[in-house]
Amino acid sequence: MKFLYALLIPVCACGTVSAQNVPVVGPGRAVDPFHYSIQKSASFTKGAVSSAHPLASLAGAEILRRGGNAFDAAITTQLVLAVVYPGAGNIGGGGFLVAHRSGGENISIDYRETGPSKATRDMYLDKNGNVVPKLSQAGHLASGVPGTVAGLFATAEYASMPFRTLIQPAIDLAENGFVLTEHEAAGLNATRESFIRNSTRPSAFLRDTKWKAGDTLIQKELAATLKRIRDLGKKGFYEGETARLIAEEMKRGGGIITADDLLHYTAKKRTALEFTYKGYTIVGMPPPSSGGIIVWQLMKMMEKKPLANYGFESVESVHLMAEAERRAFADRAEHMGDPDFWKVPVAGMTNESYLQNRMNDFDAAKATPSGNVTAGQIKESEQTTHFSIMDGMGNMVSVTTTLNGGYGSRTVVGGAGFLMNNEMDDFSAKPGVPNMYGAVGGDANAIAAGKRMLSSMTPTLVLKDRQPFVVAGTPGGTTIPTSVFQTLVDIIDYHMSAPDAVNKPKFHHQWLPDELDVEKGFPEEVRKKLEAMGYTIKERSGIGRTEVIKILKDGKRETAADIRGDDSVAGY
């Protein structure tokens, strides 16, 4: 059956509440995997979801419609993404959750992958001490111990519906199939040879002819894996048959993850970061995510600047914001890592006096060469996916989850049907040597067994008068925190709508390499003036795929999905 690829309302948001025991997914159901469309923006009165795939947004919204809260919807949305968005949605990767509960509590859950027990600091160096990039970027040795499933069960503590109900839509989609979009078909075709090189068994992603839009993808092995999780809980992944299949795949392909590594993985609840910006409260993810601290630094460096007077993407505003980004990434390289292994000076890095001093050498007339910018002295990851959810009860959930690169390590676990991550590349294989995103790190992010690699993921919430206002986040490797920063400035300083804040051209600076990345559509006159000030400017493909929900004055949830992909919104 043909996929309906159009900017249309996918499912009527009206009608009566469905019974929980009626299937969510199926032909003619609330979520029809053979007839669906993409909706880029809408306003909803109660619950809203924005994610990287229309089926995931629709399934999450249906859970909300049936009486579930934002945490219920987050579990379903993430599991459906693991089926319909294999390039980044996953159960073989990891992620971060930041949430605001209706009672006022802010929480964060860290289910970042960890280094296997056999991981060593120099495991990706050759005999001459040089980094061998392919080892950390593709194949079995590139994978960290996955955390997504543990994160789902940590999230379930805040849910109101049975886990087996929340996972069933993903099982149905894996077992019975769904039609591919043009983007998805192209991605599977482009990655075909890499799947063959880096997996030891055939998978559902491979067939003799090329995939095309409208083809049905059925994943029976993944469905069986999801059923084990449904029936056995967390043990259905980290123990028993699934753990055996992962360990055997690793052994066949020269990987180092063991059954014991899986058995001992735990998700961690951490204290969410909170700071104020111009009267708003920003809630973010602490380390081992670097994103929360970077956004804190960037916004505090901007707080006393007249950005609204400068204007959106004026020379003055872009120059100022890029220079702040340059300094924040220099700090990231020196000071950030897994707080269980490295003392991350959070208080020092976010101290207001320190941040104001970071901009003391800012020159309004010219760019500062990155060679002249070092980390401040303190005394004390691209294929990711994000989804944003609000319910009608005052809960907000922001989740960024990842395999790291597109389709992760390209290793499909034989017999289990899911892709493993290539997150080991997010460690610093060698101090000063950039990873696949050009990010530079040092001892703080060195490889170690059991350690969580530094991340750029930046799930973020905004409160206005301590009440829900914005849920935001994006994929994009090192561009994640700068994209979230720009999105928040667009909404707070420039009073943009959610769709404009998501879709207008973005820019990015990360200290090293010393260049300013801009999207197509970035103002040409501004670009020329910045080049005259000393910037090296590189035009690149889309930066991130941001998902935003914003509460309007009338209480409606203005919801936006990025135009840069198949992202879609749903709600009621």
Image (cartoon, rainbow, N blue to C red):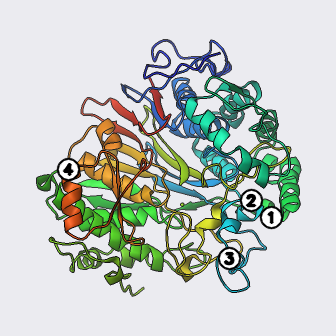
Residue behind mark 3: 448
Label of residue 494 in the image: none
Dividing the image into 4 quarters, which one contains the C terminus?
top left
Q: Residue at x 42, y 62 (%)?
A: 292
Q: Amino acid at mark 4?
A: Phe
Q: Residues within 10 Å of mark 1 (few under 14, many from 20)?
A: many
Separation (CA) of disc 2 from disc 4: 43 Å
Kindly identify the amino acid type of the residue bearing the numbered disc 2: Gly
Disc 3 versus disc 2: nearer the observer? 2
Q: Quadrant of the N terminus?
A: top right
- The residue where tag 2 is placed is 139
Front residue of this view, candidates 83 and 75: 83
> Nearer the N terminus, badge 4 or badge 1?
1
Dot 3 or dot 4, earlier in sequence: 4
Label 2 to label 1: alpha-carbon separation: 8 Å
Q: Are marks 1 and 3 in contact (CB under 8 Å)?
A: no
C-alpha distance separating marks 3 and 4:
43 Å
Residue at horizontal 79 percent and vertical 36 percent from the top: 227
Marks 3/4 in contact by CB < 8 Å: the verdict is no
Q: Position of residue 431 (x, y in %)?
A: 55, 81
From the viewer's perspective, tell me whether residue 508 is left or right of residue 269: left
Tell me the element at label 3: loop
Q: Amino acid at mark 1?
A: Gly
The residue to which callout 1 is attached is 255
